[in-house]
Image (tube, rainbow, N blue to C red):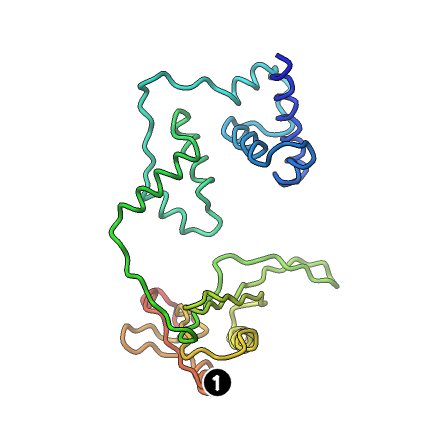
Amino acid sequence: MAARRLSMRNIKEVLRLGAAGLSSREIARSLKLGRTTVQRYRDRAARAGLSWPLPPELTESEIEARLFPPPPPAGTPRGMPDWKHVAKELRRPGVTLQLLWLEYKSAHPEGYQYSRFCDLFREWKGSLDPVLRQEHRAGEKAFVDYAGQTVPVVDRETGEVLEAQVFVGVLGASNLTYAEATASQSLPDWIGSHVRMFEYLGGVPELIVPDNLGSGVTKACRYEPDVNPTYHELATHYGTAVLPSLCKLFSVKVG
């Protein structure tokens, strides 16, 4: 009984500190608990629909029953996740496997626990047809694009919060990555990001592969996509070439 009271006290403290903005690591250090234990408490509370402050009408026994429901009877069928839907949702910015598992558990409380959910998803992915593996020579290609999500930037003088774009460039062979925040995806920012990327890399790749961003590619075409003239001049100046990606040739907006 004493151990159960201690557990409930810890759970309440985990929820209280989490509501105050502390991370699982910080909560674990404060309460002298394992980080996995803290995260497990938080996951159980999320599945049970409980948050801090706890509803005053619930007794500790009722809270415990919601956090630790009895296991389903032996032989009870478990709902199998829609793995195609899971894979599709994972491609969306900010979506994680844990978020999708919580969504699955809300619909199937008797369903698989997180570790088994992850194992089954990996098994499903492994059963798919193999994809083409691309080989890259060192210094051959740099893949460039903007990240899907913006980042908030605070103006020091006015305090205004602005949404900055995130430019990312990755070398194909080494995966060496350059990233920076810019005010927009306009052509001056796009060109400036390339110049700073070359300075960071200490050299220029043979090919630049943009994902058909409107600032870099003005017309989508399977065989001869049109490269923005300024972008072409950049490539000529640095002795490289622009090779637009074939991944989105028919979804780019004409700039």
Identify the image quadrant of residue 252.
Answer: bottom left
Q: Residues within 10 Å of mark 1 (few under 14, many from 20)?
A: some
Identify the residue at image location x=56%, y=29%: 41
Work out whether residue 127 or residue 196 is closer to the camera in this orientation and state it.
127
Identify the residue at image location x=33%, y=72%: 220
Q: Position of residue 14 (x, y in %)?
A: 63, 31
Work out whether residue 131 or residue 150 is closer to the camera in this orientation and state it.
131
Q: Position of residue 190 (x, y in %)?
A: 51, 73
The relative height of residue 148 versus residue 88 in the rendered view (above or below) is below
The relative height of residue 149 versus residue 96 in the rendered view (above or below) is below
Identify the residue at image location x=40%, y=72%: 209
Work out whether residue 188 or residue 79 is closer to the camera in this orientation and state it.
79
Q: Is residue 241 left or right of residue 237?
A: left
Q: Position of residue 175 (x, y in %)?
A: 46, 65
The relative height of residue 14 versus residue 1 in the rendered view (above or below) is below
Work out whether residue 16 or residue 255 is closer to the camera in this orientation and state it.
16
Identify the image quadrant of residue 137.
Answer: bottom left
Quadrant where the N terminus is found in the figure? top right
Give the number of callouts.
1
What amino acid is at disc 1?
Tyr
Quadrant where the C terminus is found in the figure? bottom left
Residue picked out by circle 1: 238
Q: Position of residue 105 (x, y in %)?
A: 42, 31
Identify the image quadrant of residue 210.
Answer: bottom left
